[in-house]
Amino acid sequence: MCPSKVADGETRGWIVPIGGAEDKQAHPDVLSRFVALCGGKDARIVVIPTASRMVETGAQYQRLFPTLGAGHVDVLDFDTRRDASEKNRLQTLEQATGVFFTGGNQLRLSTLLGGTPVAKLIRIMSARGVTVGGTSAGASILSEHMIAFGSEGASPRASSVRLAPGLGLTNRFIIDQHFRQRDRLGRLTAALAYNPFAVGIGLDEDTAAFIAPDNTLEVEGSGAITVVDASSMSYSSMSEIDQNDAVCMLGLTVHILTKGASFNLSTRKASAGDLAHQKD
């Protein structure tokens, strides 16, 4: 799905994909910043735990977000596609200042919510300024092109990734999560071989990309973000190989960003930001 058009005079909301396993107790920097962007004490956050089959998932965040300053938190789970058309749920969602997708299985999210009034409403809300975030599977679903599943390993192979339509808040990037911890460079670069237009964003655990309305990506959290830019790729063997063969890709640009660094998704320029001014 394509992103909803931002109306004249309005500003798109922040998009916040998180790499999973975010610190919820000792140093909850990622989730605290998400709550602040949603409005802090004035926030009305809707948690969508549909990706998870664990009953406690939604309730966990419903208890957690108020301790980080959120004024009000609702949980909206969707067990069937019919649920995603229910009027009362849509009314609750429409009042939100922030939407948060939990982790789990991103294909469960896409098959239950894809093409429903809930998916359409969240795109509209994002275009009119509502912050939308998600962790792990909830991060993968945010973009137009979603990594549905794939295999681990550093080398891209034609068979190492399968793509599916995501929520469509943006078409500028493809997300992969638990990135360093699960050795997912190969499947992210394979996804870019299929779709060189997008920027690949590999999120370590307890690390988030805070993507501002001007398409500037800011890093928050204890890990790193691997940004892979295929816009200058001069050659890809993807169309010429068998499914299990490694893919040759020439001309990729790779950035490793940590807290304080940034990347502009429009200009494709990285910046060390505050890191360049730190003293030894």
Image (cartoon, grey):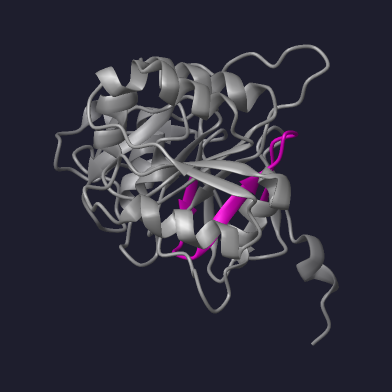
Based on the picture, tell me whether residue 93 belongs to the magenta stretch.
no
Horizontal side, residue 31 vs residue 78: left or right: right
The residue drawn where x is 43% and y is 27% is 167
Q: Could you say which quadrant of the image residue 11 lies in?
A: top right
**Above or below for 253 versus 273:** above
Q: Which residue of the protein is positioned furthest toward the front in this rendering? A: 88
Residue 20 in the image: state x and y as whole percent: 41, 58
**Above or below for 39 versus 184:** above
Which secondary structure class fits the magenta region best? strand
Q: Is residue 266 visible?
A: yes
Horizontal side, residue 47 vs residue 55: left or right: right
Residue 242 in the image: state x and y as whole percent: 14, 34
Q: Is residue 203 visible?
A: no
Q: Could you say which quadrant of the image residue 212 lies in?
A: top right
What span is colored magenta in the figure?
A: 201-218
The residue drawn where x is 39% and y is 48% is 102
Residue 202 in the image: state x and y as whole percent: 46, 52
Camera-side residue of 263 and 111? 111
